[in-house]
Image (cartoon, helix red, strand yellow):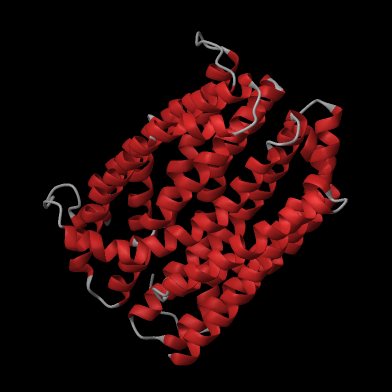
Amino acid sequence: MYKTDSIQQKMKLFLLILFPILITQLGMYAMNFFDTVMSGKAGAEDLAGVAIGSSLWVPIFTGVNGILMALSPIVAQLSGADKKEDVPHAVQQGLYLSIAMAVIVMIIGYFLLDPLLAMMDLEQDVRSIAKFYLVALSTGIIPLFIFNLLRCFIDALGHTRITMIIILLSLPINIVSNYAFIFGKLGMPALGGVGAGVASAITYWISCFIIVGVTWKVRPFASYSIFTQMKKPYFKTWWEQLKIGVPIGFAIFFEVSIFAAVTLFMSAYDTATIAAHQAAINFASFLYMIPLSISMALTIAVGFEAGGNRDRDARQYSFMGIIIAVGMAILGGVAIYAFDDPVARMYSDQTVVIEMTKHFLFYAIFFQLADAFGAPLQGALRGYKDVNITLVMAFISYWIIGLPSGYLFANFTSFGPAGYWMGLIIGLSAGALTLLFRLISIQKQK
């Protein structure tokens, strides 16, 4: 990051930061995308099992990763305030915190996974695939959290192309591993949907080794001596990061978990409905990587300017990001409408699943428009380190408004399972509106 004097300079810098983040996010989500698509080719039970497993894992991962994302505004503001000597301590303590949180997640999963799956009305094969998909994936949780923590450090310094390159190197590994372990190729056993979890864990380990090596040996990151001058854990710094990170993590968790909750409610329907819902939500979530990437870029840009008390510049970045996100969402909606049939056929060869997927994709057009407003607003607010009110707004919008309205539409109207998608649209729209008012309020105060 560096200081800019005009809108044109800001646009150029913002796009330079944004593009690698977008490629990185698309690459990371592509791993889940290929898990889902390739599992679907193994069978509807495998697709449904991975769907259920993902619905449990993704909210947990994104929530914890949201906590680790506290490092981005911390490093960005330290850089903007010319306090670079304080960066190594923040990163090292973040590493300790990421490992501790990974261990906690694995311990909780060990005790709660079977009871959670037993609560769902699932076919035995689907339940078994979901369980062992998550067991296999869990062997890569520690390196995954380390990778994301170091990624926040690298991105906050403005070097977003580094993580883009790492993900682009890792994606082929994930695809080949999926091919080998799902279908039993290259001398590996055919594990079906469970093989997708094995492939993900392998990819997480390789990505972690690469980013650790980059941070250790490549300048300018090596100059921070993250690994050569390690200090002992310092719980006061953990607490300072948690005060920022926990609200971010829970706000993300409330948003992502509503999608997971809908998937769990979908378990009351047949396997074809679960598979179609997962296919549609998987593709729509792939498009969500665009506003999410803009959100992450805004956290860096707004944090840098806010750290240097350049409030006018921070405000300009905020609304620049929102405008870009909405424009891209309109294009995304047109693409979904025009290519719904080819998209649906990527996930399944079964006619009933294809037709239901196309039906769900129509609703995805509208809630991804709401996301185009909400995600950049969250990113800008994180740049200001304004996270507590955002947490409350997220909970009310998604869980008090969105999910109950979806339940009513699904069970008391003719919408059927599509009623849950109506609830998603309502919840995301309410969240975006409240976040806009909050951002305007913060900027007026400054």
Residue most extreme to the top? 187
Q: Nearer the viewer, residue 117 or 160?
A: 117
Quadrant of the frame with the N terminus:
bottom left
Quadrant of the frame with the C terminus:
bottom left
Q: Tell me if residue 185 can be seen.
A: yes
**In the figure, is residue 241 to the left or right of 321?**
left
Total number of numbered discs in the rendering: 0
Picture coordinates of residue 307, whole percent (x, y): 34, 78
**In the figure, is residue 102 to the left or right of 253?**
left
Picture coordinates of residue 355, whole percent (x, y): 86, 37
Q: Nearer the viewer, residue 248 or 230?
A: 248
- Residue 107 position (above or below residue 190): below
- Residue 247 position (above or below residue 218): below
Quadrant of the rendered image containing residue 246: bottom left
Picture coordinates of residue 105, whole percent (x, y): 36, 41
**In the figure, is residue 111 to the left or right of 193?**
left
Q: Residue at x 32, y 36 (%)?
A: 209
- Residue 281 position (above or below residue 312): above
Q: Tell me if residue 364 can be seen.
A: no
Q: Residue at x 56, y 59 (%)?
A: 292
Q: Residue at x 51, y 35 (%)?
A: 116
- Residue 45 position (above or below residue 292): above
**In the figure, is residue 362 to the left or right of 217?**
right
Q: Nearer the viewer, residue 432 or 267?
A: 267
Picture coordinates of residue 189, whole percent (x, y): 52, 10
Q: Residue at x 18, y 47 (%)?
A: 227
Quadrant of the rendered image containing residue 294: bottom right
Q: Nearer the viewer, residue 200 or 429?
A: 429
